[in-house]
Image: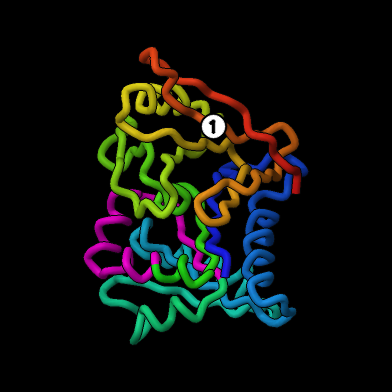
Amino acid sequence: MDRQVFAFSGVLTPRPGEPGNLPLLEHVLELGRSRWFWEGAVRLCYLPTAVGDDPAASAVYEQVFGEREDVELSVLRLFPRPSVPDVRKHLLRQDVVLVEGGSLVNLMALWRAHRLDEVLAECWEEGVVLAGAGAGSQCWHAGGPTDSWSDQLEPFAEGLGLLPFSNAVHHDSPRRLRAPYRRMVARGELPAGYATEEGVGLHYVGTELAEAVTVRPKARAWRLAPNGRGGCTEQPVETRLL
């Protein structure tokens, strides 16, 4: 089985006529379906840990996917205790694990307390497609810039590290997230990595980037690395429109 990750920046506010995040989610489902070359229901487990298992977040996915015959949706909650009797067994039988965005720091702390870091690494090795937006994108990487501690971005280098890169999301945000990430990579606070603008996803096979896709025609992914002179290079990554 290929080890696959699909890490993306969600579209926070769709423009008129835009499809929003659904094409990205459909792409994730297709990756999960292709594991077995079959046309049955894709087993999709949604983890809203990063938003404290907010019922409203789960309700959105239950509304979108709950009635579809081609998707077998489950939700894994960790508050006040795991919502399934055997977390490892449940996750290993999935085709896709989809992680909600939110607090990257809280997400990783809770996963490690429940040993989900070990279980999810095992899922990756077994070919379960790991996916997510925001913190759900960054968690599979070595780390990335986060506002989990305050309203200022700070480096967090304790991701799962399945992918040996850092990761930044919403790279085109008006909140000016781009410059802090560049500084963190230049200073060595975070390793070289990839950034995505809104609506852009990164598909990794093994530990290599296979392709970048987008739901927005002009949105891009970027590769950042130290330049050896105290600065940072930032190169665009070719992006395929879904």
Q: Residue at x 55, y 69 (%)?
A: 96
Q: Position of residue 70 (x, y in %)?
A: 70, 78
Residue at the outermost top position: 229
Above-or-below relation of 227 to 157: above
> Which one is nearer the viewer's eye here, 118 or 207?
207
144 is within the stretch colored magenta:
no
Residue 175 left/right relative to 68: left
Residue 172 left/right relative to 190: right
Q: Residue at x 54, y 48 (%)?
A: 208
Q: Residue at x 40, y 83 (%)?
A: 89
Quarter assignment of residue 228: top left
Q: State the extent of the magenta-drawn residues as a range.
A: 96-121
Residue 104 left/right relative to 175: left
Above-or-below relation of 67 to 170: below
Above-or-below relation of 77 to 131: below
Q: Tag 1: residue type? A: Arg
Q: Position of residue 174 (x, y in %)?
A: 52, 26
Quarter assignment of residue 35: bottom right
Where is the N terminus found, in terms of image quarters? bottom right
Residue at the outermost bottom position: 85
User: For the residue labelled by badge 1, is the local secondary structure a helix, a strand or a loop?
Assistant: strand
Above-or-below relation of 69 to 3: below
Q: Residue at x 47, y 26 (%)?
A: 178
Within 10 Å of disc 1 (Cα), the crowding (few <14, some 14-19, many 20+) is some
116 is within the stretch colored magenta:
yes
Residue at the outermost left position: 113
Q: Position of residue 186 (x, y in %)?
A: 37, 22
Q: Position of residue 99 (x, y in %)?
A: 46, 60
Q: How is the image coloured?
A: rainbow
Q: How many marks?
A: 1
Residue that badge 1 annotates: 223
Q: Main secondary structure of the magenta part?
A: helix
